[in-house]
Image (cartoon, coloured by chain):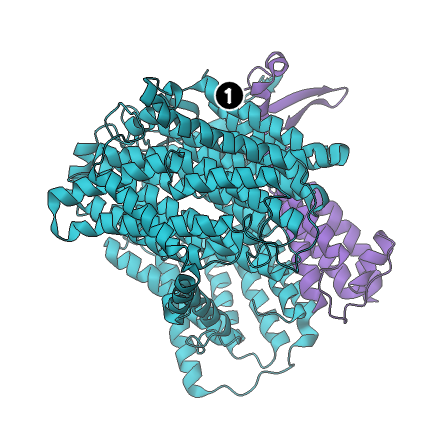
Amino acid sequence: MARTITRIVVPIVLVTAIALLIQGHNLPGGGFIAAVLTATAFALIYVIYGLDYIETELRHRTVVDRSLPIDESTAITQEFGQLVAAGLAIALLAGLAPVIAGFIPLANGVLPDLAGAPLFTQAVALVGVPIYGHVEVASALGFDIGVYVTVVGALLTILSVVGAQ
Amino acid sequence: MESAITLAVALPIVAAALAPLAHRVLGNRTAYASAVVAATSFALLVVAGPAGRVTAAQWIDGPLLAVGLTWYADGLAMLIGLLASGIGVLVFVYSAGYMAHEPGQRKFYPTMLAFMASMIGVAYAGDLIVLFVFWELTSLTSFLLIGHYDDRPASLIAARKALLVTVAGGLFLLAGFVVLWAVADTTLIAGPGGLLADPGALAARLRDAGLFVPAIALLGVGAAAKSAQVPLHFWLPDAMEAPTPVSAFLHSATMVKAGVYLIGRFRPLFVGEPTGEWTLLIAGFALVSMTITAALAVAAEDIKALLAYSTASHLGMIIAGFGLASTVGAETGAFHILNHALFKAALFLVAGILAHEAGSRLLGDLGGLARELPIAAGVASVAALGMAGVPPFNGFYSKELLFEATYHLASHEGGLWWLFPALAVLASVCTVLYSAKFLTAFTGSRPDSAAAIGSPPWSMRAPAMALAGGVLVVSIGGLAPLVGAHLAPVEAGVASVVGSVGGHAGFGYHVPTHLTPPVAMSAIALAGGAAGLPVLDRIVGAIDRAQSTAAIAPSWWYRRALDAVETGDPLAAIESGRLRPAAASVLAATAGLTLVGYATAGLELPAIAGLPLLGAGVGSWAMSIVLVVAVGSALAVTRAPSHVAGVLTLSILGFMIAIVYILGDAPDLALTQLVVETLVLVLFLLVIDKLPAFYGEIDRMRAVGDAALATVVGATVTLTVLVTTAADPRLDAKIAQFFVARGPLPEGAHGVVTDVAGGHNLVNVILVDFRAFDTMGEISVVAMAALSVLTLIGMRSGGEQP
């Protein structure tokens, strides 16, 4: 019974989380909220289906019995840790982009305002889309995605380690 | 070129990021690629020259605060920077041979390159903040390099020890910087408007504020921790667990010189009378440290430990030189930085050759290797003679200058100041002894147990020979004046360093031609050393006995302190491992500190205009109902019979707070609160089966104590919220207007827009655009929290104590 509900709810939660992430710039939402919601969805899976479900179904691995004392953290925990590092890298790159662009002569012609600007300057591009009209694309989304990935990785790391106890 | 220095620092960092990839392609030859990077940095620094102050990038440029990436290039900076990159080239070439069959090459080269960049950053830092950041980066990279062999517990313990000591020193350093900043109102070190622009005036202001001696003490502790002076010297011998290229690079020629650099850089500010506080504190402690560590070096049996103690001793000599007020003192320090780097790095490389080929680092196992390792023996002899201070080798000249400076001080002031030259001579006697001891690896006869000796590759021989060549060049420069020539580049370079540290320009050195008291002191030192050689074993025994008295060894105190924290002997009541006492102590301490802080700052409660809870309008009625329910649920938590009920009731409180946010027109906050509350609830379900189902009986007294603590914490938080959200209408309006004006896109915008944020959700816009740097810090903290949870729980399942 609980499994059926979870099977229905989790995809909805995940879609809501992504929606919150993308709409964060103009409507309530944003990277952190989306990340915590995603972690909640995964926590739900852990509670209902058990810790090994994600590893066996998504990564197709045989799982080490968690009751055995192990020196290394399990593979899934390490992958969550890599998520954290990736998220920090994305956020940092998003912030460094204008600084790096300032060093590349070509970029000066393409994005005159952005190249050479101080750290963490963001821009908004208005892209023309047929029928729909103009779509605002904010470069802050890149940084927000970095925040999202970092917090998801951190929370899932904590989840997978604490849950194993 | 303005950006040459920035490039010299940035290039090794970029190379460090690319090194793991390069390693996949190049394998062992990554070492030569790194050497090329180091050589490029060296060339860039030479091109940049003594450019004075250069601001590469301004970060904060306001009326109250100005911080940026500022470099300051002068003689002292160039000396340390060129040493870092130059010896870096040699060490990288050496690593090609040494690390060829060692594990962990993929992390070795990036870390070494990152270290080199940090060291150049320290040397060229023109701003206190830049200096501190690079200082801590050197500590961090040193920690990674010492713990290179991460399968050996001894390496990990040594790395931790080094990190704790140098970072603790770094905190003292930061405190010293804050003192300087508070009095001088600027963070720029040198150049116009900097701390050193008018040293006399700044020194007077420090004295008026009563902060002159504290500043010296704080900076001194920071430098002593980094340069391994007594009593913070005990991490350096343990750091010899690192691979030998690391020891040669970090712990002889560069990183430990950071402390010396600090003393030299701030010398013009603090040096005053010949018998002032600076000389007493800095030179006094340094000379004592020099003697003690020299004695410890005599007693060492491991060649790397011997060299480590001797490094600490020579660093004490440099610091003592800078501690003396005369120009001769400045010359001592400046010249010995160069000399020591040359011969010590050479000796470490030879030690590495011995370890690599003969398979042992203990002097008992080595002997008579001169026949089989002739080149190594030659290099070692030249370097050791320089270390011992035998004329005409290079160490002799700097030692002679020290004797001259201390003798002049003593003969002018008399009395107890005669201790200074006495200590200097005593330390020099020990220096001769341990230099000779090092050479016994090559002299004498082979022990029977020794294994077969291989021949080292040229990649290991060439750097050692190059360094010995440097020693010889400087040594010959001292003989040259006898025939009327001068080694101009060396003398001019040292002269500019002397100028940077506040001495008078003009430097020349030569072999002394007639007998003066300092020359007599040198002669006594050499004679004493020579006389001690036959009875070396007895001397070693005496030093060993003195050392084994546990209470003297700082290492013993370090171990005791660490044990006390870990097993909680004196802290048993607090750190017993149970949650309640730990949480209670942390909460009580935090609340207490906050309240004390408020009281000290003379905080005034903002005027409360009244609580609009029961006024007219639906909004305030709804708010009051919600708050009443929240308070009710909080009380219900205390009465909850089981964990499940308690947590669910607590969640009601959380959701009520979310509704308060909604009523207060803060949708983002409400969303965050709702989502976090849900996550915590689901998380709790994960661990529910590990907890007992029902609470036990509550002890009355404990409940009263807990209630009191809770009240104090609640009062502190309420006070904090009231104070921090006190509305200042003028200021708030301006900030709010700034954000509102730049938030949404204006009408008719097209293309790419950068000066407007382009979003309607101002909270999110502030987070990711206006204040993105703060958010970067916040997610780093989240990442660190995850890392700590991982480590703590991982250690618990592994059976360790954190």
Which chain does the residue under circle 1 lie in?
Answer: B
Query: What amino acid type is highlighted by mark number 1?
Result: Leu
Which residue corresponds to mark 1? B44
x then y, percent, for residue B558 = 43, 64
Which quadrant holds the C terminus of chain B?
bottom right
Q: In the image, what residue occupies the spot 42% across and 42% down? A: B387
Which chain is purple in the rendering?
A: A
x then y, percent, for residue A55 = 82, 57
Which chain is cyan in the rendering?
A: B
Front-lying residue, B484 or A148: B484
Q: In the image, what residue occupies the spot 60% across and 25% down? A: A124
x then y, percent, for residue B208 = 14, 43
Front-lying residue, B599 or B310: B310
In the image, is residue B365 above or below residue B59? below
Residue B669, visible in the rendered structure: no
Q: In the image, what residue occupies the spot 17% across and 42% down? A: B409
SS of the residue under disc 1: helix
